[in-house]
Image (spheres, rainbow, N blue to C red):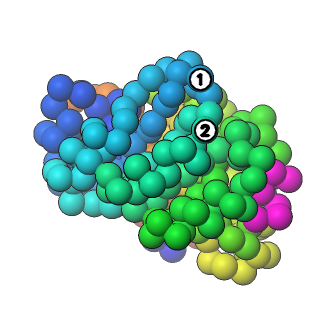
Amino acid sequence: MTVRLAPSILSADFAHLARDIAAAEAGGADLIHVDVMDGHFVPNLTIGPPVVKAIKRVATRPLDVHLMVSNPDQYLKAYVEAGAAMLTVHAEVLPHLHRTIAAIKELGAQAGVALNPSTSLTAIEEVAGDLDFVLVMSVNPGFGGQSFIPRALDKVRAVRALLDRAGRGAFVEIDGGVDLSNIAAVVAAGVDVVVAGNAVFGHGDAAAATRALKAAAAGAAARG
């Protein structure tokens, strides 16, 4: 089992994004996680397609774009064209989730669905066989630097079992509060992709922080 690390630029220095992305990639980042917030679905505003397009020009890893917005269908094409290789939408805002997943795939990106901490797996049971991945939120979305919600580990296990039953080889991603203190438990629960923001960019040396997280994840995976 190989665990991938996706540093979240939400915690990077927006005045020096190219520098911080390069540092994370030098430390072994597998993906670059981009949080898009609209000030409606979550109480924060971040970036739009022009910034994603600029990030695409400097990043050497695939862009993992997470749409925390009230009307994601309106923006799918714009973000894929800007450079998203993976596109995540939230189950909580989509009455026609199957259609949205199909639209993302038709645009050429991997399709994922995010579940907030209070959202049940029943929201994705009928589309589990169509998904490329599921993103388990281990904090309430909207801001970086929040504390990990321990119950997310049980949700990861349940999502892993659901996807295994669906039989498509979809992967599990987790986002929120993951750091060196809990990454081993996260991996042991069945996570394939770890999003880390403050743990990468919040301590001055993003390359070293990325290497440390990758090593801890690899060690946990090796222990099974």
Label 1 element class: loop
Question: Residue 40 — which label?
Answer: 1
Judge whether 174 appears above or below 68 on screen: below
Judge whether 35 appears above or below 165 on screen: above
Q: Residue at coordinates 49% horizontally, 31% vertically from top-left?
A: 37
Q: Residue at coordinates 45% horizontally, 54% vertically from top-left?
A: 77
For this rendering, which residue is in front, 164 or 57?
A: 57
Q: Main secondary structure of the magenta part?
A: helix
Task: Indicate the position of residue 186 as horizontal and vertical percent values.
Answer: 59, 51
Q: Residue at coordinates 66% horizontally, 79% vertically from top-left?
A: 168
Rate crowding at label 2 as few (under 14), some (14 to 19) or many (20 or more) other CA atoms within 10 Å. some
Q: Give the amino acid type for the residue marked by disc 1 in the picture.
A: His
Is 184 on the left or on the right of 131, as rendered?
left
Is 157 on the left or on the right of 210, as rendered?
right
Task: Indicate the position of residue 12 as horizontal and vertical percent values.
Answer: 29, 32
State the quadrant of the C terminus.
Answer: bottom right
Is 190 on the left or on the right of 217, as rendered?
right
Instruction: Determine if the magenta segment contains residue 112.
Output: no
> Is residue 221 at least partly visible in the picture?
no
> Is residue 117 at least partly visible in the picture?
yes
Label 2 element class: loop
Looking at marks 1 and 2 on the same chain, the residue that comes earlier in the sequence is marked by 1
- The residue to which callout 2 is attached is 71
Q: Which residues are magenta?
A: 121-127
Task: Indicate the position of residue 27 as horizontal and vertical percent values.
Answer: 23, 53
Judge whether 163 appears above or below 39 on screen: below
Nearest to the eye among marks 1 and 2: give it.
2
Q: Residue at coordinates 63% horizontally, 62% vertically from top-left?
A: 101
Q: Give the amino acid type for the residue marked by disc 2 in the picture.
A: Asn
